[in-house]
Amino acid sequence: MKTDLRFPKNFVWGVATAAPQIEGAAFEDGKGESIWDRFSRIPGKCHNGDNLDVANDHYHLFKQDFALMRKLGVKHYRLSLAWPRIYPNGDGAVNPKGIAFYNRLFDAMLKEGITPWVTLFHWDLPQALEDRGGWRSRLVTEAFATYADTVVKAFGDRVKNWITLNEIPCFTNMGHGQGDKAPGTNETQKVINQTFHHAILCHGHAVRAVREHGGKGARVGLTDNSTIPVPVTETPADIAAAKAWFGDVNAHILGAISGGGYSAAYLKRCGADRPEVRKGDFDLISLPTDFLGMNIYSGTFVRAGKKGKPEVVAFPPDYPQTSCPWLKIVPQSIYWGTRLAHEVYGAKNIYITENGCGYDNEPFVDGEIQDLHRRDLVRNYLKELHRAIGHGVPVRGYFLWSFMDNYEWQDGYTRRFGIVHCDFKTQKRTPKLSAKWYARVMEENRLV
Ligand code: GBH
């Protein structure tokens, strides 16, 4: 029987990870300390006191990991580079062993027929830069520009898909505001806004670096975790409210990078705390990109309130969720997120660079982790992604987070996001039921 849940020809199916969460070898071969190496050692900050020292030991086991990917039929893999492995002090001297490691890694990946999608920065700022002001200081943008030039030059012959930064709000707002991510400080709103401005400026530098040194066929885009409204009813009034809300809450990032600078509404909200912007900053920030990466896990319900004004409806206590309180199960978020990014900010080629779910309790049954909850969640989100594509939203690919269980930041190793189980004592990898299911999806290019 024919299925209508087939995806477009050439749709990119992949899996995702990030260097600090899987590599381990945190102090090996000259790697410098990152702010997460430091933060994870502050008592009480990370679950169980778990740190990134060993993680999945991917630094030593990457060949076997790529072999497993190949066995599962993975053809596209999103990973990140560890800045402190390349520049242990953030800037200054390059660490040749860091370059050599990624050379070995890319060669091994390509040998297995896997196409790399490389994020330049996934939160592991060199501690040496933090000591000089970190994201608060403009210095970070100069260091990042040099780092971006270096890695694009070094790996651009084999890497054609570049992602500038991962989830800017997490390492700016959450790192310096709520303090639950590294560096874990509580700064003033003015400082937080400045960290944010430096981050989008780094995005611009990465785009520039790829244009200058990326060679033929190089493509580049940001990965954003946009704030996503889901209309309570799919009726014109609620859709209009959701659309207005989406435009407003994402203006400082999606609007800024797509040529609009900071919106008047954003600057008004900042008031006296507005960031210092230098002449020429927005020339870099708004350099055209080739795609938009979106990490979509959840959404916020919005409806038309008084006079049609957007009104957020809070989640009731028993709303279904995963083991992460923030990850409420809202499959329609992937439909509305991609559709609104396209409609409101003109995003042309959209890739879901992360989607998935984390659970604390996934027992083996007869040697298999039967994670029907994950299979079901991913399938329901993918159905909504399929709907978006059917409605003309230009979605080109999907990366499942994550290839394997890994270091889930402040939730340590307890929170498992992988489709492959990792025993962190023995480093044994075991594909879960969801991995076998996803392998069929990738192979058949349709929901099975
Ligand atoms: C992504 O971030 C990361 O890119 C990835 O490294 C990570 O492992 C994965 O997802 C799973 O977590 O203020 O309490 O409402 C997750 C996105 C966005 C999750 C902000 C927490 C806010 C929590 N994050 N969110 S709260």
Image: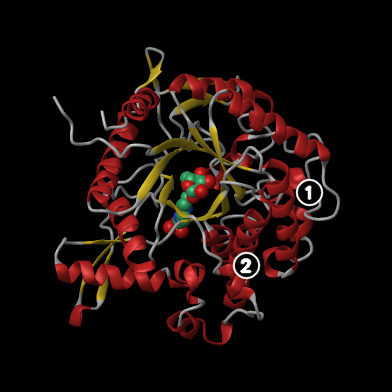
**How far across and down, in percent of the image, does residue 64 sit?**
59, 20
Establish if 401 lies above or below 190.
above
Residue at far front of view: 216
Q: Along the horizontal axis of the image, is 285 left or right of 151? A: left
Residue at 51 percent of width and 81 percent of height: 270
Image quarter where the C terminus lies is top left
Inter-mark Cα distance, 2 to 1: 20 Å
Residue 361 in sight in this render: yes
Residue at 19 percent of width and 68 percent of height: 238
> In the rendered image, which quarter is residue 316 located in?
bottom left
Secondary element type, mark 1 = loop
Q: Estimate how packed mark 1 is, as few (under 14), some (14 to 19) or many (20 or more) residues with alpha carbons within 10 Å.
A: many
**How far across and down, in percent of the image, does residue 321 sit?**
32, 46
403, 283: nearer the viewer: 283
Establish if 415 lies above or below 134.
above
Image quarter where the N terminus lies is top left
Colour option used: secondary structure
Q: Amino acid at mark 1?
A: Tyr
- Give the residue number, with chain letter if any, for mark 2: 201
